[in-house]
Image (cartoon, coloured by chain):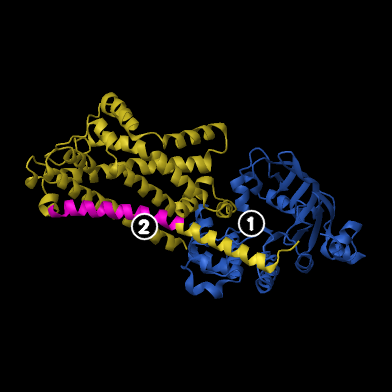
Chain colours: A blue, B yellow
Amino acid sequence: MSEFQDPDMSAPGTKMHKKSVLELRDVSIFYTENQAVKDVSFNIRRNKITAIIGPSGCGKSTLLRSLNRMNDFVEGARVEGELLFADENLYGKDVDPVEVRRRIGMVFQKPNPFPKSIYNNIAWGPVINGYNDSTDELVEKSLKQAALWDEVKDRLHESALNLSGGQQQRLCIARALAMEPEVLLMDEPCSALDPISTAHIEDLMFELKQRYTIVIVTHNMQQAARISDYTAFMEMGDLIEFNVTKRIFTRPAVKRTEEYVTGRFG
Amino acid sequence: MPLSSEQESINLARRHRKARLFTLICGMVTWSGVLLLAVLLYQVSIDGFRWLDWQFIDSFPSRFPERAGIKSALVGTLWLIGLVALISIPVGVSTALYLEEFAGKGKIAKIIEVNIANLAGVPSIVYGILGLAIFVRYMALERSLVSGALTMSLLILPVIIIASREAIKTVPMSIRYAAYSLGATKWQTTWAHVLPASFPGIMTGVILALSRAIGETAPLIMIGALTFVAFLPEGPMDSFTALPIQIYNWVSRPQEEFHQLAAAGIIILLAVLLLMNATAIYIRNKTERRLK
């Protein structure tokens, strides 16, 4: 039993608690009248990969997008409850969403490189945020972190749209990493990719968690089981279960979780 | 009950016949338009080519057809188009950006939208009257190039705005989200990504609108562009004439020679138009390739 014990499950306020980067407390998200996420509470731990799984429409992507205020762009979206990031509510009155997004990066479901050169895809974010060191180094470093450098180092000034889908997605990861985000959110980053590219990105995530905190939404349960340290299982907007991944996939506490992870529905 | 194969083949033959008939009709309609244009061009060339030489381009109008030329009208048109572009492009594109990116979906935005669509359908002579009242009289800009350019800008602004909005709409949301997720403000996102990505579409709209302005006669007559100008405008406050007005003037004279001069003027006008469109297509293709 002890192997499943999460050392970081301690109550808020204790020393262990500081291992959390993001704390969700009774988070509810509405689209006009529809409630997409209902009273969800859990903590996201530093330098770990947290996976959010669940059937389509369970609110997992919505929840993810609320973590860096990307929901602000959805008309009628409203967030209730507390989302603590460095002890500050992300939805507090004097919080600037632009600042939030600078510190909490995001990789989207479909690769969405800018229709510009590979180099500019990466350099743009830091530059507009006031980075004034050499962007050459930054570009190289970010591309290396995203395991893309060797494939593109000779064509940095070619259009990013000439890359393959998997390369584009790694470019998007590199672009997000160039901002040195404290948390990296990934919304089904492999769903548009072939198995080889997917394996690439999964390997990459193992590397990245040394330095970053990652939250990933995925449809693919094997993927969640393979890569994540913690797993949140959601259904119909409710958080059914949150625990260390091994536990969720071997001895879940809730029957519904077991049914889902063994593929009986969803 | 399923159809017998015999019925089916009869049926299929009939459907194919219908499809061929439809293709034929569409083709005929298309080609009749092209044919009409060809006849027009032929007629104009027959009449005008004889007069088309450097002397024609480099001379001021005259009451003697053999000495008359189109210099002042051509220069006036170039001035006019330049000024119109300077005024209408920034205003039109900014308006489109505001409506698409910043205004939201509120009631006021809706009202502006409907009104712009309506303005696009207002006859050009009405803009002429407006220009006469506001620019020539009220703002006392006289019968100058500026008055003409401002009036023409009003006329084509709705077209530029509508075309630019369509171009901006085609920029995928995912590009905007990518920029926002890097901590970009709305303005940074718009300036660095939305505007460049929609640039080819905006260019197309702008050129189409400017081409319309080049051929417009009514508003210029209304604000009093002169028909006989024997000098070149030297600044935006000078009075002027333009190609369509010169053509109009020549056509309305009784002598046959002047009608032929008008045809030559039309050839010049078409050449300017073609040149502009070609430039636009060149710029568009170039930027499109860069974006690809």
Q: Nearer the viewer, residue A232 or B14?
A: B14
- Looking at the image, residue A35 sits to the left or right of residue B104; the answer is right
- Looking at the image, residue B124 sits to the left or right of residue A21; the answer is left
The quadrant of the rendering that contains the N terminus of chain A is bottom right
Label of residue B281 in the image: 2
Q: Disc 1 marks which residue?
A: A106
Q: Is residue B97 above or below residue A5?
A: above
Tag 1's secondary structure? strand
Q: Nearer the viewer, mark 2 or mark 1?
A: 2
Mark 1 burial class by Cα count in 10 Å: few <14, some 14-19, many 20+? many
Q: Amino acid at mark 1?
A: Met
Q: Is residue B123 above or below residue A4?
A: above
Please give the range of residues in magenta.
B25-50
- Chain under numbered label 1: A
Query: Is B81 inside the magenta-drawn segment?
Result: no
Mark 2 burial class by Cα count in 10 Å: few <14, some 14-19, many 20+? some
Label of residue B232 in the image: none
Tag 2's secondary structure? helix
Residue B146 location, quadrant: top left
- Looking at the image, residue A192 sits to the left or right of residue B256; the answer is right
- C-alpha span from label 2 to label 1: 37 Å
- Chain under numbered label 2: B
Main SS category, magenta section: helix
The quadrant of the rendering that contains the C terminus of chain A is bottom right
Q: Position of residue B133 (x, y in %)?
A: 30, 25
Q: Nearer the viewer, residue B39 or A116?
A: B39
User: Quick one: which residue is furthest to the top in this view?
Assistant: B138
Q: Nearer the viewer, residue B282 or A127?
A: B282
Q: Amino acid at mark 2?
A: Ile
Residue at image location 50% in from the left, 40% down from the top: B99
